[in-house]
Image (cartoon, rainbow, N blue to C red):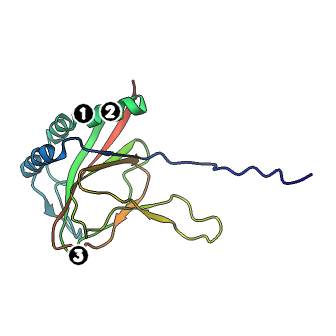
Amino acid sequence: KGDTMIPGNLFSIPMWRLPVLNFSKKKKELEQLCKAYPERKHGIQTFSTNRQGDRSGMAAAFASILEQELSMFSKRIEKDIAFEDIWSVSYKKGDYHTPHDHGTIGLSGILYLNMPKDAPVTQYIQPWNDWNSDRTIYLPMPVKEGDIVILPRFIRHFTEPSKSKKIKRVISWDMTLQNA
């Protein structure tokens, strides 16, 4: 009787990428914000971050600067968002971030504040191996300075060692969702 096979996907993982509007103006404000919360290396980390320090007030200031973008995102997903944590990370030449995730519930965001053209992009690891080869699948996310990427917190991700002589800096945050 012929082929009755119906192709499709069993699962999908949501992801959003959006630009920071009026980035050149907001970049200066975000860089000033980062100065108020200095980064340093901790333990065996190869990169500098302020995640282990006091960041009281950072989320409110960040949300104020990016009010337009966060509001658009909230409307798009039809949920209110609440920051759980926020921090910045800087990568010098040779710095990298090992595979990690941010938990199981909610979303994580990354804003690429300083993104040299030769800096490595974030690579995302598919939560299951390839069904045919049993290999781990990871995908680089093409981004540029001023881009925001938002995805579920459970997605493992990493960066390769930076080959850039310029510093790559991101601001990352975790958020929960409330019904709008």
Query: What amino acid does circle 2 point to?
Result: Met
- Residue 78 pos. (x, y %): 41, 28
Query: What amino acid does circle 1 point to?
Result: Gln
- Residue 49 pos. (x, y %): 18, 59
Image point 51% across, 58% down: which residue?
A: 127
Query: What amino acid does circle 3 point to?
Result: Gly
| Res 99 visible | no
Q: Which residue is identified by label 3?
A: 94
Q: Are marks 1 and 2 in contact (CB under 8 Å)?
A: yes
Image point 14% across, 47% down: which residue?
A: 24
Helix, strand or loop at label 3? It is: loop
Q: Which residue is identified by label 2?
A: 72
Mark before the other along the chain sequence, 2 or 3: 2
Q: Which residue is identified by label 1?
A: 68
Say which mark, if any, is on residue 92. Answer: none
Helix, strand or loop at label 2? It is: helix
Image point 26% across, 44% down: which residue?
A: 85
Which of the two discs, 2 and 3, sits closer to the camera? 2
Image-based side of 24 in relation to 74, left or right: left
Mark 1 vs mark 2, CA separation in Å: 6 Å
- Residue 54 pos. (x, y %): 13, 47
Helix, strand or loop at label 1? It is: helix
Mark 2 vs mark 3, CA separation in Å: 36 Å
